[in-house]
Image: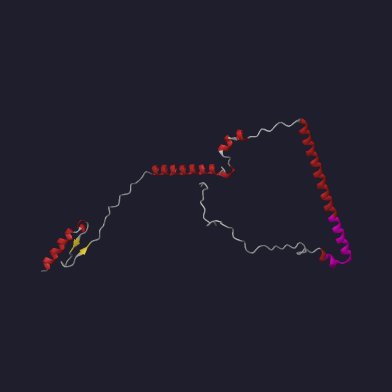
Amino acid sequence: MIRITIVSALNRLSLSPFSCSRNISTGVNPLYFQFSPCLYAEPLKKKKRLDPAIIKQREERRRKRLEKQIRRLEKNARQLKPIDELEVPLNLTYEKRERQRELPPISPEEAEERALLLKEWARYKHSQHLADLQMIDRIIFAQQKALDELRKESEELYLEAIQIDPGLIPFETKGPVHTPPIKDYDSPDGEYVDISRKWS
């Protein structure tokens, strides 16, 4: 009875799909079955010994390739990245003649009048600048004279006078605490599409 059971079990095992890759060992006891694991491997390949000259040539080639890449990167590093906003579109370059205005020529009398007006304006601004400087000098001189006289009277009052007054220019603002909503305003959700070009 036991023999029939063992034979039927072996027949079932021989029909299984793993029978080609597993070995069955009964060992000493025929009722003890032990399966070996599936090993799908091949023997290690023997390392080929290379000529030291070939290894040196490969290293030299790799070093030259790296140096070439470094030189290319250094050359490109000096070039500034173009800013699209500052580049003039090509269609505007082509339409330059069409867009250029042709002004009528200025008569010699008009040119002379403009030159005289410009000189007069320069003289006026120069005299205004000198007047401002003289007024500032007068104010500083009067202030220093008043401080000197105050120092002669009282050293304590002089020290109090030269202190910086934080409340000399008071600045207070009071604005709206709540902004009324804008009618039919489509509020942005904070998402955007980045269309800027990527530079390596």
Residue that sits furthest to the front in the current view: 183
**Quadrant of the rendered structure where residue 118 is?**
top right
Relative to 31, is 86 on the left or the right?
Answer: right
Q: Tell me the quarter of the picture where residue 84 sits.
A: top right
Main SS category, magenta section: helix
Q: What's the magenta region?
A: 139-159
Question: Which quadrant holds residue 142?
Answer: bottom right
Identify which residue, 90 or 97, lies in the foreground.
Answer: 97
Is residue 83 something that shows in the picture?
no
Residue lying furthest bottom in this view?
Answer: 1
**Closer to the camera, 22 or 139?**
139
Q: Residue at x 17, y 58 (%)?
A: 15
Of residue 167 and residue 45, the one placed in the foreground of this image is 167
Image quarter of the N terminus: bottom left
Assess whether residue 34 is covered by the magenta stretch: no
Q: Looking at the picture, how far across and down is residue 71, in whole percent?
A: 51, 42
How are the residues colored?
secondary structure
**102 over 29 or under it: above or below:** above
Residue at x 79% of width, y 35% of height: 113
| Residue 128 seen anywhere in this rendered image of the structure | yes
- Name above or below for residue 57 compared with residue 111: below
Closest to the observer: 135 or 52? 135
Q: Does the magenta-highlighted stretch encompass residue 140?
A: yes
Residue 9, x across and y down, in percent: 15, 64
Q: Position of residue 59 (x, y in %)?
A: 43, 44
Residue 67 spot, x, y in % from top left:
49, 43
Residue drawn at x 19%, y 61% is: 24
